[in-house]
Image (cartoon, helix red, strand yellow):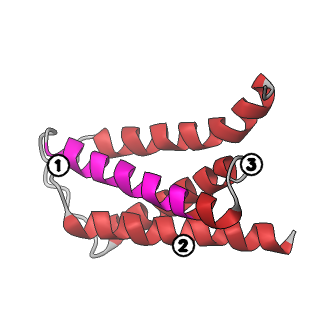
Amino acid sequence: MPERGSFLRRWLPAGLWALLIFILCSLPLPAGARKLPSSDEAAHFGLFAVFSFLLARSLLRPYAGKKAFLLAVVLSLFYGLFIELYQILLPGRFFEYFDFIADGAGAVCGGLLWVGLKRRM
């Protein structure tokens, strides 16, 4: 049976990052706010790269490197889809395909970064 502290050390960072993503994506946009070209997509890319990295880190103990990477990317994509669908319900927010694509690209890069770093260790 795994130790409770070990489980929390592995999963707490990914859980807190998922909460941060949810909070940031739930904030209303200021009235008349105009985003810079590609700034929103860059933010999504970065948020989901870190999220996938943290998920891969959490999953590496129970799964081999490739499985941890794939599972981290798939979980990140589902979370990104959930966030985009959730934003439909918020005033001034929308489902944006380019945000979802940025989520996926970030998830792949973050997962690959973790796997690459683990191979060097």
Disc 2 versus disc 3: nearer the observer? 3
Q: Earlier in the sequence, mark 3 or mark 1?
A: 3
**How far from the left and from the top, in percent, is residue 55?**
59, 51
Vertical comparison of 20 with 107: above or below: above
Magenta span of residues: 70-88
Marks 2 and 1, how far apart at CA: 26 Å
**Residue 93: assigned label:** 1
- Mark 2 or mark 1, which is nearer to you? 2
Q: Residues within 10 Å of mark 3 (few under 14, many from 20)?
A: few
Q: Secondary structure at mark 2?
A: helix
Kindly identify the residue that appears in the image at 50 percent across and 70 percent down: 108
* Residue at 43% in and 45% down: 21
The tag earlier along the polypeptide, 2 or 1, is 1
Residue picked out by circle 2: 109
In front of the other: label 3 or label 1? Answer: 3
Quadrant position of the C terminus in the picture? bottom right
Give the residue at mark 3. Answer: 61
Residue 71 is situated, as x and y percent measured from the top left of the image, at: 52, 56
Kind of residue at disc 2: Cys
- Cα distance in 3D space between marks 2 and 3: 20 Å
Looking at this rendering, what residue extends furthest in the right direction? 121
Dot 3 falls on a residue whose secondary structure is loop
Q: Main secondary structure of the magenta part?
A: helix
> Residue 52 has which mark?
none
- Is 49 situated left or right of 94 in this image? right
Residue 120 image position (x, y, % from top left) = 84, 74
Asked whether 106 falls inside the magenta stretch, the response is: no
**What is the spatial separation of the Cα atoms under label 3 and label 1, in whole angstroms?**
37 Å
Above or below 111: residue 23: above
**Does label 2 or label 3 sit earlier along the sequence?**
3
